[in-house]
Every structure is written in C-alpha cells, then in structure tokens.
Image (cartoon, helix red, strand yellow):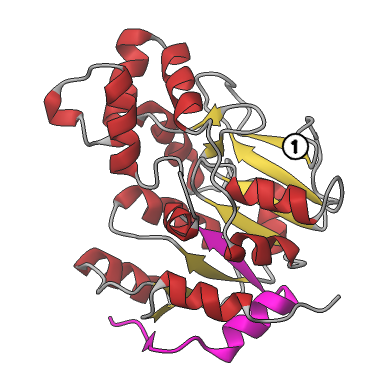
Amino acid sequence: MTSATVHELPDAVIAGLERGTLAPYLGPGMLSLCQGATPPADPVALATVLTARVSVPGKIKNRLTAAAQFIENFKHRKTLVKAMGEAFATPAVPSPLHQWLARLNAPLIVDTWYDDTLRNALAAARPGKNWAEVQGLSQSEHFGTWTGGYDAAGQALPDPSAAATLLYKPWGGHAPAGNFLVSDSDFVEVLTEIDIQTPIPQPVQQRRSALGFVFLGCRFNDQLPRAFTRQIMKRSAGPHYAVLADEPTRMEARFLAEQGITRIALPLAEVAAALTRQPLAA
C-alpha cells in the first residue's frame, strides 16, 4: 500500500478548514511555530524534564510512558501530576497559526499534547463564548469517568455538546485542571476500551462523522499516537491530510496508506505561513 503525496498545499485543505468540513488535529510539533520559551515539545523532551525532577533507571530515561510509570509507582501519582504541571506551567505564546485556527468556526479541534497554547488562543480570540473543551481523564484519579468537560472559563461543564467549537484533548492538558494521561497504566486503561470507542466522548463521535482531519505537528512513528489517531478517525467522513516534511518511516507510511491520509510534503512553518495569509470571513 502507498499513500498519496503532494508537494503543495491543496486548495481543498484551505477551503475545508475555512468551511469547517476539515478539522485540525494538532500534535506537539505545533510548538515549533511558537516564538520564545515553550514547554517540552516532544515525548523525549518531556521525559528528560520529568527525569530531571525524579531519578529513574537509565534504560527508561528517554521513554516517556515508562518513566512516568516508574515515578507513579515509586514516588506516588501526586508526584507525577505535580511534575507534569510544572513542566507545562510556563505557557507558550500562541503562534500565528494557533491564532488563525482559534478564529475558525471549526466544529472540532483535536489537540494531542499537554500544553495550553490552543486553549489560550481560543480564549483570546473568542473570550467567554462559543467553545468548550473535553479532556481525557486518568482512570487512576477518575475511575469510571473517561473524560471531563470545561467551558471557556475553565469551569466544569457536564455537557459540552452545545458549543460551536469543541476542543478535544484525548491525553488531557495542563489547564484548567491538570489532567494527564502519561504513564503506561494510563494508556493501557484507555487502549483496553478504545476499540469500542468508550473513552471517546459522544460529541466528538457525532461531529467527526461529517469531518475529515488535517494533521499539523503530528508524527505517527510510535504505536501510541497511531492507536489514538486510528480510533479518533474511525467513522469520520474524510478526506484526511497530514503535513509531514520528513520522509515517513516504514510504519508511518504504512499507517498513512491504511488510513487514506494524503501526505503534504512541506515544512509545517511553510504551511502555517500559507494558511495565516488567508483572510477569514467575518
């Protein structure tokens, strides 16, 4: 199997994002667009930050979920949550692309990293209205409850389905409540159920049925993001696109082909510049 590759930004991507028929799906690579200091911008960098705070065996120092599990097992869950909170306490300044995405009338935005950058961009662009957030919850802290909803002010929102834009953070996030799926056990709990879609909130399942996804700042060179992406995409309408300048690994190429994702072989910064030059309708 091979996936389609294009070497320029298709007009259909720009139009789909503007019309709300394509949903942005963000990864940690989005932080590369931000000026100044940023939180850890990939799993290895985050593992380095966590293991600088709490000593772990050398063989797992660069393996985020294993290092997090060691901290949870031997130093308590609260220590892990505190370390995660500190790692993401200093916010990044939203890039022009974050700001552009926040002004879209997107029915769904998926954000698979722990930083607050897109949340802060939404708060600035649309203060107090028209958007809400759903975050994945760790079963070790919220047993039996898979997700938590929050309004634009960060207050608990039991039913976020009425929001015009829904920000979905399946791995949790720093704000507003310090929810983090990061340890091996966190992900095992979710992956045990994700095939039958239990951890994926109903508003996300409903909205994706009319959407395709545009992957920005994402890599698929690890089993974990592939597993989540596959299940979040399930029963979505398509088409799907991934901005991926680097030649994909064998497993990435296989995944792109399997999921029918067209690769846009351009640097993320170049795509960001092209998108942010697009005027948005009032």
* 117 on left or right of 106: left
The amino acid beneath tag 1 is: Tyr
| Residue matched to label 1 | 150
* 4 on left or right of 250: right
Visible residue check, residue 239: no
* 179 on left or right of 256: right
Along the line of sight, which residue is nearer the eye, 65 or 39?
A: 39
| Residue 150 image-quadrant placement | top right
Q: Is residue 174 magenta?
A: no
Quadrant for the C terminus, please: bottom right
Part of the protein shown in magenta: 1-26
* 226 on left or right of 134: left
From the viewer's perspective, is residue 57 above or below residue 194?
above
Quadrant for the N terminus, please: bottom left
Along the line of sight, which residue is nearer the eye, 157 or 145?
A: 157
Residue at 16 percent across and 21 percent down: it is 57
